[in-house]
Image (tube, rainbow, N blue to C red):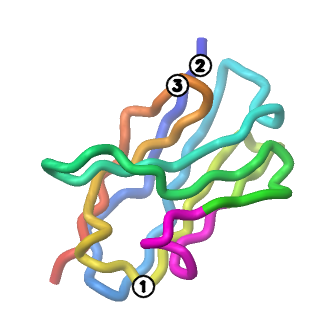
Amino acid sequence: QVHLVESGGALVQPGGSLRLSCVASGFTFSSYGMNWYRQAPGKPREHVAGVSPRSTETIYAASVKGRFTITRDNAKNTLYLQMNSLEPEDTAVYYCNTQTYWGQGTQVTVSS
């Protein structure tokens, strides 16, 4: 079955950087688009970034464009989210997604 396992979340100061990873298994990773979502306390889950199967297309939420970069390594079945210039508003649980499948999430907290 499909498994998505996120890692890399942490407590970081404003202006800092983090790289999230999502290791996928149970499906042909290189055939599917992949996404990052996030959910802050008391708020709905929101789409952060997406990447096409061969990385030819990416899409970002306006709130993260220019600060976050989504990439994938199809040889390693791994999805990444490089997050720079982090702001307190980026605090959330970040989820990896493909099709109808979700990972368990990884907590990112931006605070001084």
Between disc 2 and disc 1, whose residue precedes? 2
- CA distance separating discs 2 and 1: 32 Å
Picture residue at 39% right of the left edge, 50% below the top: 46
Picture residue at 18% right of the left edge, 77% below the top: 111
Query: What residue did someone put label 3 on?
Result: 101
Looking at the image, the residue that sits furthest to the front is 62
* Residues rendered magenta in the picture: 60-70
Query: What residue did someone put label 2 on?
Result: 2
Looking at numbered disc 1 in the image, what kind of residue is underneath it? Ser
Residue 102: x and y, percent?
47, 30
Residue 7 magenta-drawn?
Answer: no
Query: What residue did someone put label 1 on?
Result: 85
Residue 43: x and y, percent?
21, 50
Q: Are marks 2 and 3 in contact (CB under 8 Å)?
A: yes
Looking at the picture, does residue 57 appear above or below residue 63? above
Report the number of discs.
Answer: 3
Q: Quadrant of the N terminus?
A: top right
Looking at numbered disc 3 in the image, what kind of residue is underneath it? Tyr
Picture residue at 53% right of the left edge, 31% below the top: 4
Between disc 2 and disc 3, whose residue precedes? 2
Say which element carries label 3.
strand
Q: Are marks 3 and 1 in contact (CB under 8 Å)?
A: no
Residue 49 picture quarter: bottom right
Dot 3 alpha-carbon crowd within 10 angstroms: few under 14, some 14 to 19, many 20 or more? few
